[in-house]
Amino acid sequence: MMTSYFDRWKIKLSQKTPRRKVMRFVGKRAKSLTTQSRGRPISHRKPKTVPRENIAFLPSIIFSLVNRGKEKARSKIKLNPSDLRVWVRQGRSSVTMVLIVDVSFSTHQFLPAVSRALGIVYRDAYRNRDRLGLISFQKKFARILNHPTNNLRVALGNLASLTPSGFTPLAQGLRKALQIFKQEQKRSPNFIPFAVLLSDCFPEPLTHKYADLLEEPAYLETLKVSKDFGRKKIPIVVINPAHGKDRSGKLKSGTRLGLGIARLSNGKYYGISEKEAPSRKTFFAEYAQRQYIEKQARNISGFLDDVRVDLLTIQRQEK
């Protein structure tokens, strides 16, 4: 049962495409162009390197004949590298999301809202090709609970079975996510990746040698891995249920780290601050908790849905 009530904070770290311009992608899978061997061929183009697959033979032969001229038209056809063309195919893009869950005591109580939010995001039939992976921290290690799967029930079942753990090797969990995305790239080169980090962003272990926690090796290593996400164009969406300021009025180190993770990975940050907790002494306390979970689930699902649509739109524009 939830014991805290949180005020919603949304902090956007990258420019967001207006929703009215991308609504045409909602309700169907966005079309994308690729030179991979999957999809329907719609045109051809000259490759940047000598291709080993997806060769458009008829256009290549035509270009070879044109380049040879009339005097050699009756000789045997010989394809030169400059004659080769590859198909440009049209296919459907699928989204692969990897959820990295910190099950520390401050975050564990927020799992019902996240589980409900994921159910909302993935419930529509047109998303049956999207895939969800799950990584959790158990004891002193990050563990892959689910490789990306279309079976949402399995992933949510594992999410619901998580028990609180006090140790958070954040950098290790992010590296596990990169490994998953690397495997997905081999399986489906045209997929759209993004990671969701549910954490209060207080990584461990700590040396306790630094006045500023952001100078701790665990914090620096987490930021370093976040840069790798940015270089690979894999955004991280940070959901921090412990967003806020400390007693001195400064942002908590976890909040600062979460903002840094989102910024370095070109992702987004969703912060939730503990403030107005519904009292346990009231007669309607349990009802208030249920209402709170449903409200936060709707907020998070809308936020994740916007991120998903934006990624589909950006991919189409880049193609």
Image (tube, rainbow, N blue to C red):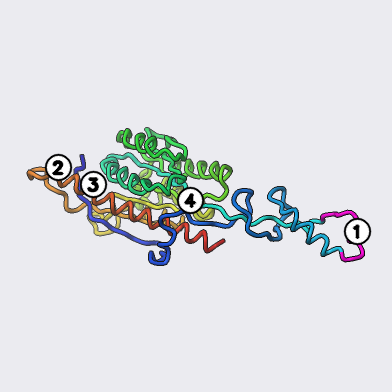
4 and 3 marks in contact (CB < 8 Å): no
Along the polypeptide, which appears first: circle 3 or circle 2? 2
User: Which amino acid type is shown beneath numbered disc 2?
Assistant: Glu
Horizontal and vertical percent position of residue 73: 89, 61
Measure the C-alpha gap from mark 2 to mark 1: 86 Å
Please tell me which residue is depicted at 43% across the width and 62% down the height of the picture: 24
What's the magenta region?
69-79
Residue 286 bears which disc, if any? 2
- Position of residue 69 relative to residue 112, above or below, is below
Quadrant holding the C terminus = bottom right
Q: Nearer the viewer, mark 1 or mark 4?
A: 1
Q: Secondary structure at mark 1?
A: loop
Quadrant holding the N terminus = top left
**Residue for badge 1:** 74
Say how many tags the image has: 4
- Residue lying furthest front: 74
Q: Does the segment drawn in magenta span residue 73?
A: yes
Measure the C-alpha gap from mark 3 to mark 2: 11 Å
Horizontal and vertical percent position of residue 118: 35, 46
Measure the C-alpha gap from mark 3 to mark 1: 75 Å
**Residue for badge 4:** 224
Horizontal and vertical percent position of residue 97: 44, 47
Nearer the observer, 48 or 64:
64
2 and 1 marks in contact (CB < 8 Å): no
Q: Nearer the viewer, mark 4 or mark 3?
A: 3
